[in-house]
Amino acid sequence: MAVVGATGVVGETILRVLEERSVPIGKLGLFASRARANAVRYGGRLLDVEPATDAALAEYDVVFFASGEDASERFVPALLERGAVVIDNSSTYRMDERAPLVVPEVNGAVVERGDRLFPVANCTAIILCMALAPIRNVAGLRAVRVATYQAASGAGRAGLDELLADERAVVDGLAEPPAHVFPHHLARNVVPQIGQIDAGGATGEERKVREETRKMLGLPELFVSATTVRVPVRTAHSEAVFFETERDTSVAELSEAFASAPGTVFHASGIVTPRDVEGSDLVHVARLRQEDEGSKRAFALWCVGDQLRKGAATNAVQILQLLLAGGFVQA
Ligand SMILES: NC(=O)c1ccc[n+]([C@@H]2O[C@H](COP(=O)([O-])OP(=O)(O)OC[C@H]3O[C@@H](n4cnc5c(N)ncnc54)[C@H](OP(=O)(O)O)[C@@H]3O)[C@@H](O)[C@H]2O)c1
């Protein structure tokens, strides 16, 4: 098994989740953009990383990608050619019709024998789908509107470092260093742009949330409107979700659906914040309510999930566990 991007925030979380879940590994390869000694921790030891190359990766049966689109485009085709299983956190293959976009609790049944390429969906879309799947199951879904509150580490280690540098400068009363990763300074701010804004006014992140949510929920016609916003939170994305169901339902019926939904924690009262869920593999749902008094098809909720875990690394490792459990991959 190999991890490409092992030094990044998602790569290091994949290693933590593999350890926590005692996933059997014969040989572990750790790759990044360049070689470094003692760069990552696994099994209580500091291990070296090597630069990813076709020849080096050819030794592995399962390869996790936690780097960027360039590395996935460069290395994935040859790996698939030689029969390896690829679990890719980048956006490169998410909308490829041949590749299932799997969230085991939502659509694990779409995996077919012979599938070897498994993109991991956008972190915001995964958290959203975990909150929407129980609703889809009991009352159908007609429309979803969502405003997001996304953590700095969603933009990788560089995003987290930029927030920390901004915060330090603010506390010390110094000039903040120029913003590179985010379009504006993030400390004491919220930034309503994640990705490039297109001619129609939507950002790249908003398009991903729409398209990938439809694909994961198996609802290609679902109305999805997103406004994605970066906030000065270190880890865990929050989402304010407004949704319309196909059939009449109630807070009581939806609460019951959440209470038995795998991978979610339902808070019937009170609130939940990103700091409460950092390090958790579960998506938390709270503040479920009618959108207007008496409405039977229009509701709102708040959901929060650690985007490095369920939004990326945990979902990636769960896909491997699903393949192992189904006998698609031999331990
Ligand atoms: N952060 C999140 O919340 C999140 C959530 C879902 C999905 N994702 C996706 O997951 C991927 C990783 O994101 P991240 O946030 O972990 O980024 P990150 O912290 O910036 O880490 C990127 C990793 O990729 C490595 N890398 C870069 N170019 C490479 C190349 N050509 N060959 C091999 N390794 C290369 C880097 O190695 P060096 O250390 O050598 O630079 C580093 O280990 C991205 O595709 C991102 O879109 C991220």
Image (spheres, rainbow, N blue to C red):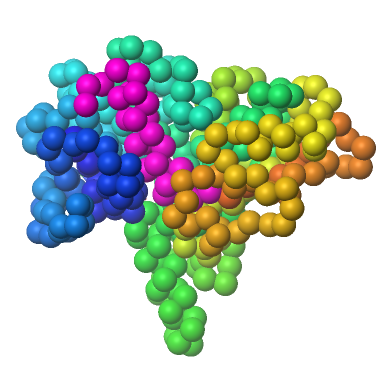
Where does the magenta region start and end?
A: 305-331
- Residue farthest to the bottom, as pictured: 173
Task: Answer whether residue 133 is visible to the viewer in this image.
Answer: yes
Residue 205: % across, % down: 51, 42
Quadrant location of the N terminus? top left
The answer to which quarter of the image holds residue 93 is top left
Task: Answer whether residue 209 is visible to the viewer in this image.
Answer: no
Residue 52: % across, % down: 14, 41
Q: Is residue 79 magenta?
A: no
Q: Which residue is drawn at the image coordinates 52% and 55% (left, top)?
A: 277
- Residue farthest to the right, as pictured: 294
Q: Nearer the viewer, residue 88 or 179?
A: 88
Q: Is residue 314 above or below residue 214?
A: below
- Would you say the magenta stretch is mainly helix, strand or loop? helix
- Residue farthest to the left, as pictured: 55
- Residue farthest to the top, as pictured: 113
Q: Is residue 311 magenta?
A: yes
Q: Is residue 177 left or right of residue 245?
A: left
Q: Which residue is drawn at the image coordinates 45% and 73% (left, top)?
A: 166
Residue 30: % across, % down: 16, 45
Q: Is residue 112 above or below residue 236?
A: above
Q: Is residue 318 left or right of residue 44?
A: right
Q: Which residue is drawn at the image coordinates 50% and 68% (left, top)?
A: 185
Q: Is residue 257 left or right of residue 53?
A: right
Q: Is residue 301 left or right of residue 69?
A: right
Q: Which residue is drawn at the image coordinates 51% and 30% (left, top)?
A: 105
Q: Is residue 20 above or below residue 2?
A: below
Residue 72: % across, % down: 27, 34
Q: Is residue 97 above or below residue 189?
A: above
